[in-house]
């Protein structure tokens, strides 16, 4: 039985629901980017980018924008080898989507993809890793293509970021309230736990993941092996991000479907 009252902001479903609150999402972005931004808006409640029938569609967890930038914020709980390529794919599809809606190249906004990781994606102890395109021969020359990829690590140990952002990451990691913003986040988490609509959604996703993990053990995929758990976690994350909850549910009892899904997402078993 899933204890809904123990679910924190580290939970993907909870994170997405909380960040649908414009004021909290705005404060989150301001801490991450270390600057004031204008009021943000959400183009759609759940943004699905799919520009080609042969391509893989993606559901962007948090997709919002202000006057000069578009932001995609994702909470990453699983350690994946393709995390960097995934950020590239998200960014490319956002640009293509904007262009297909009539924007010219010169009109493209800053495209900022932010992955908040509950692990260190580069094993260097930093809280923040920021990537932009520069010239390898002349490192002082920036391409200035208005794209940035940010990877945050909730378990950072280096004193490399401002205290407000450090407090935010610490709250995600262990739930400790240390300032007014994390207090607001915590109060919102408690409020959502009591909301019947959100409780049902969170518990449905959590139960599907739990069932999928049990099936993996039964099939001998995991049996105590970390690699097996990573495979299941990766498949679950793909299905949740693509909003394929029906496939996620069906795969908990249909081994053939599970195998097909591993193949579809190019997950080597």
Image (tube, grey):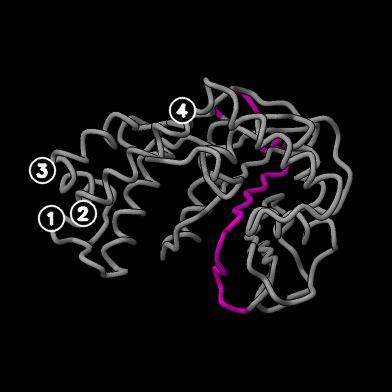
- Where is the N terminus found, in terms of image quarters? top left
Name above or below for residue 111 compared with residue 200: below
- Foreground disc of the pair 2, 3: 2
Task: From the image, tell me which residue sits under label 4.
Answer: 201
Return the mark for residue 216: 2
Secondary structure type for disc 3 = helix
Residue 101, magenta (yes or no):
yes
Residue at 79% in and 75% down: 159
N-terminal-most mark, 4 or 2: 4
Residue sitting nearer the eye, 145 or 240: 240
Q: Residues within 10 Å of mark 4 (few under 14, many from 20)?
A: few
Task: From the image, tell me which residue sits under label 1.
Answer: 219
N-terminal-most mark, 4 or 3: 4
N-terminal-most mark, 4 or 1: 4
- In three-dimensional space, the C-alpha distance between marks 2 and 1, rounded to whole angstroms, equals 5 Å
Q: Position of residue 200 (x, y in %)?
A: 46, 26
Q: Position of residue 174 (x, y in %)?
A: 64, 58
Splitting the image into 4 quarters, where does residue 5 fall? top right
Task: Find the magenta span and give its range.
Answer: 100-124
């Amino acid at each position: 039985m899933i204890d809904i009252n123990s679910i924190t902001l580290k939970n993907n479903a909870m994170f997405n629901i909380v960040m649908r609150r414009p004021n909290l999402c705005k404060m989150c972005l301001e801490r991450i980017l270390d600057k004031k931004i204008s009021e943000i808006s959400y183009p759609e409640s759940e943004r699905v980018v799919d520009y080609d029938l042969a391509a893989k569609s993606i559901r962007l967890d948090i997709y919002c924008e202000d006057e000069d930038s578009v932001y995609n914020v994702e909470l990453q709980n699983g350690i994946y080898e393709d995390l960097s390529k995934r950020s590239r794919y998200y960014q490319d599809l956002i640009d293509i989507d904007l262009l297909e809606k009539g924007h010219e190249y010169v009109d493209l906004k800053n495209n900022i993809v932010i992955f908040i990781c509950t692990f260190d994606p580069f094993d260097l102890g930093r809280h923040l890793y920021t990537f932009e395109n520069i010239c390898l021969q002349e490192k002082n020359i920036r391409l200035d293509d208005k794209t940035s990829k940010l990877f945050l690590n909730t378990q950072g140990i280096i004193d490399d970021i401002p205290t407000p952002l450090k407090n935010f990451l610490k709250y995600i990691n262990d739930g400790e309230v240390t300032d007014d913003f994390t207090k607001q986040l915590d109060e919102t988490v408690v409020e959502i736990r009591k909301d019947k609509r959100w409780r049902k959604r969170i518990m449905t996703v959590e139960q599907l993941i739990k069932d999928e993990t049990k099936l993996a053990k039964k099939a001998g995929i995991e049996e105590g092996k970390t690699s097996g758990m990573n495979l299941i976690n990766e498949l679950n994350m793909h299905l949740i991000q693509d909003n394929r909850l029906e496939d996620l549910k069906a795969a908990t009892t249909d081994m053939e479907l599970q195998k097909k899904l591993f193949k579809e997402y190019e997950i080597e078993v």
